[in-house]
Amino acid sequence: MFETTKVAPLHVADEAFLIASLIERCPKTMMIRELFKNAEESAMSTVDGSKVIEIKVKEIGGVQKLCIWNTGAGMSSEELHGVCDLAASLGKDKGLDENFGMGAKVASLPSNRYGLRYRSCKQGVVSEVILCERDGVYGRYRRELSETGTIEEVVDVTEACKSEGSYDLARDWTEVVLFGNRADQDTVRDPYDGNPSVQKQWIADTLYHRFYRLPEGLLVRFAPGAHKLDGTRVFKTIPSRAYQLGHSESVSSSTGITIHYFYDPPLKSTSHNASVSGAMTTDVSTCAIVHKNEMYDLKRGRQWTLDAPIFGIAFGAKHISVHIELPDDFAVRPEAYRQFLRYKEDDQRQVEAEDFANLVREKRPEWLLKIISSLSPADSESAGEIRNELQKLLNALRIRSETPRVTLQGDILVDRNQGIGVRGNQQGDGNGASSGKNPRGIQDDVLAAPTGAKRATVSLNAERAPEIIPLHDDAAIEEKGIKGKAAKFYRESGQLFVNMNYPSVNEMKSVLETEYAASPDPEIMRRMAHDLAERTMTLKVGRAVVFALAKQLNREWSTEDMARAQSPESLSLAADDFYDALQNARRRMGQALRVGRQDLEDAVV
């Protein structure tokens, strides 16, 4: 082993370039997280008095600027000067899993090139520094003092704070004000100078969708003007606010992962959920990873409703949230800018909520399953028949699932998705007894299992036919993202959502109605034409899914190839070709309506 004295430490050849690179590569939207986290840690250091963070508005030069103020140990001028450097922090443990010492500065400066003002009060003395960017250089802004003519980076602004009259110098505190990129930029309403633009409640929503819990005893206040409502409001996190309004449950797994399920019921006579009532934050449902009380890989709105079936939320995702909380010691860590988590092992890929979709489906509480079922459209008898047909096709093709859903529990084969139990081969005498003994005591019975016989391997098709869910409601079709497309298949949950308003249904129906217009019972004829058209399209897309699944047996087809074959676009093309099914539909209609082709032709003439 080498001694440390034998290693020449690396140095930075171009320090200015490295600093600019670190700052300008940081995602802008991480700014409020980093500033708030600093304020939280500082406020929690308060020894005597309340632990408080205030989000408020400062008017500077007639322009609104966002301000974050907190209690906690203040900083002297020397301490304030020191923490402005990158990888510098005060009173914190530095490490890859903890504090980097550069988050707030790196995340804030890209959107505050004009200035980021820090003030800190320690023992009645207020020190101030402004971080900024000028001519491509990031650093402390140097100011000339009128009284002494000296150039300073950190200045004493105690008297200025007294004259402003809004500061309490009897206690320690720290404050940061965002000047933005221009003197006339309103950083309360436009923190990123239009790139990206934000909604009025952006501050509260950003914190709401990042911090899952706050430390015990911390009070976060939003002053007037810093939120969408009136007066001063107290900020609350999702578990402390929303979970009290609907039905919620937390379910733990053997690995220490906890799944939080929350149903936010619709608010009567509105398009909102109940959690919107009196809140300064959004009511939109979400799915996210939670680690060390922070949320990652957040899915919300349309993205969540599209992905929800993967997690077993086939319907009602607008009102249902799922949060996957990992133990603190789980083998993950935040990436450099804390935008997402990475696994510590192997290829250190990004942690995604979909990684835990199977666990989320498995742990769904009974009350949640009932809610999902109540929001589901009624499954038609035809859909069940088609599923049986597809299962026969699957069995014929001998498709095997990559992760078999059929497992052996004792002597019962159990389908984990469908709850289907099938009796497997039993070690016995062949006469229905499972004890292994011949009930008649005849050792040479030709029906008895030979000595040394073992349980045979049960060969069942591990792949289940897709669950067919027909959609007729435009809102449901829009929610699943298949407007203008025939169907969408969720491989993870084995569900096939079929758009019954897809044009090919009406096209086939029109063809049949025209050909059988002479039917003695037009109403029955039209209903039958409609049912046959829907059945044909459902079977078309179902068979397309089955044959796409069959390609997993073909080594020349990659996972991406299979995904494309099962895509809504591919299924739509399959649905468009209904012409080869017309002859069979005509035959069924003719038999049911007792009208022959010649009779129809004569009737038309």
Image (spheres, rainbow, N blue to C red):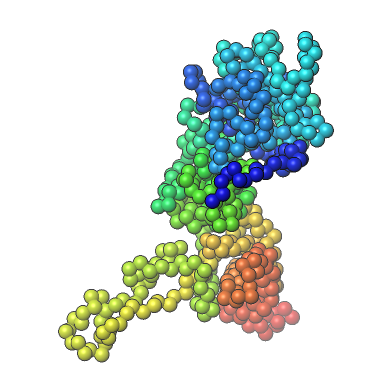
Q: Nearer the viewer, residue 484 or 437?
A: 437
Query: Relative to 524, does residue 265 appear above or below in the rendering?
Result: above
Q: Is residue 527 found left or right of 451 in the rendered image?
A: right
Q: Nearer the viewer, residue 592 or 99?
A: 99
The x, y position of residue 216, in whole percent, is: 47, 30
Residue 115's spot in the image, x, y percent?
75, 27
Residue 352 in the image: state x and y as whole percent: 57, 52
- Judged left or right of residue 412, residue 387 is right
Mark yes or no: residue 345 visible: yes
| Rendered residue at 51%/36% (across/down) | 213
Closer-to-camera residue (158/223): 158
- Quarter of the image for residue 348 reads bottom right
Residue 229 occupies quadrant: top right
Question: Looking at the picture, how far across and down is residue 176, in whole percent?
Answer: 66, 25
Quarter of image, res 91: top right
Could you tell me which residue is drawn at 33 percent across and 71 percent down?
A: 411
